[in-house]
Amino acid sequence: MNATRLPVLMYHRVGPPHARESSGKSVATERFSAQLRLLASAGYRGISAADALDWLLGHRTMPEGSVLVTFDDGYADLVDCAAPTLAALKWPAAVFLVTGKLGGTSDWSTPAHQLLDPAAIQALGRSGFSFHAHSHTHPDLSTLPAHALQHELQVCRAALDELELDSRLLAYPYGQHSPAVVEAARQAGYSAAFTTRSGFNQQGDDPFLLRRLDVFGTDSPAALLHKVALGTNDGSRRARARYLTQRLAVRLGHRQP
Ligand SMILES: [Zn+2]
């Protein structure tokens, strides 16, 4: 049966925690492994970004329980800290690259971390990862004048094409977008783009306003399972209880869905 909704997980860095880093942007290696293994044991299955895009555009069906795992920024730690878990589960994953910084560091964040270089990208590409656009230098696209906006999106696409990577998908840096950014992305030839708004994705949704669930370093595996079931960034017990209460109220006819 065709799935009615697609949850997309948004990770940033997976690896050893850094003292000066917020738990929002970094998930420890063991926690990442435990999170995905619990999802798998609950019946979820990772799908590729290409299959997700085809489903979103109505070109194919997709089994219920499909989930897309994404990583923003392209940290070098993915090789040792995320890839082994994904390989063990045979789950593909999508990485959004900052094409002007490959092999460099994430100098837009504190602390800065090492980023994947082209050789590591090619190696991961052979083990189920796909690579997509996250701009050329990681600016807030919604603040750029028109020519700079076009430049960021076009140069990034061209760099991905040069490396024979999938340049159809974009993730807006910081999740920041505006009608002008969406239009520029369309003009630059992208097919779809991810925001940081939470929720599920459904067939027929605007492909340039796709939603993702933010995974925090503080999310226990059970909390992540709740997030994926509820389509919310709040994986707490209270959110779960509220959701079940609402469902019950709807079923008893007390409230409209
Ligand atoms: Zn980013």
Image: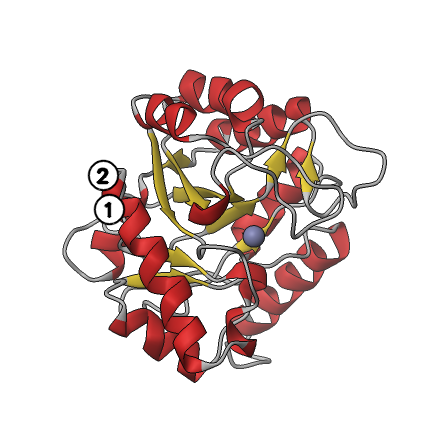
| Coloration of the structure image | secondary structure
- Distance between the alpha carbons at the discs numbered 2 and 1: 5 Å
Which residue is found at the position 50% from the left and 56% from the top?
Answer: 212
Answer above or below: position of 221 versus 72. above
Is residue 197 visible from the viewing direction of this image?
Answer: no
Does the beta carbon at disc 1 come under 8 Å from ligand 1?
Answer: no
Does the beta carbon at disc 2 come under 8 Å from ligand 1?
Answer: no
Q: Tell which of 109 and 56 is nearer to you.
A: 109
Count of numbered circles in the view: 2
What secondary structure is found at the residue carrying circle 1? Answer: helix
Which residue is found at the position 63% from the left and 59% from the top?
Answer: 244
Is residue 129 visible from the viewing direction of this image?
Answer: yes
Q: Is residue 246 left or right of residue 45?
A: right
Label ID, residue 161: 1
Which residue is found at the position 49% from the left and 17% from the top?
Answer: 84
Q: Tell which of 192 and 66 is nearer to you.
A: 192
Q: Amino acid at mark 2?
A: Glu
- Name the residue beneath numbered marker 2: 164
Q: Is residue 235 left or right of residue 248?
A: right
Mark 2 Cα within 10 Å, few/some/many (few <14, many 20+)?
few
Q: Tell which of 150 and 128 is nearer to you.
A: 150
Q: Amino acid at mark 1?
A: Asp
Answer above or below: position of 78 versus 245. above
Which residue is found at the position 37% from the left and 63% from the top?
Answer: 153
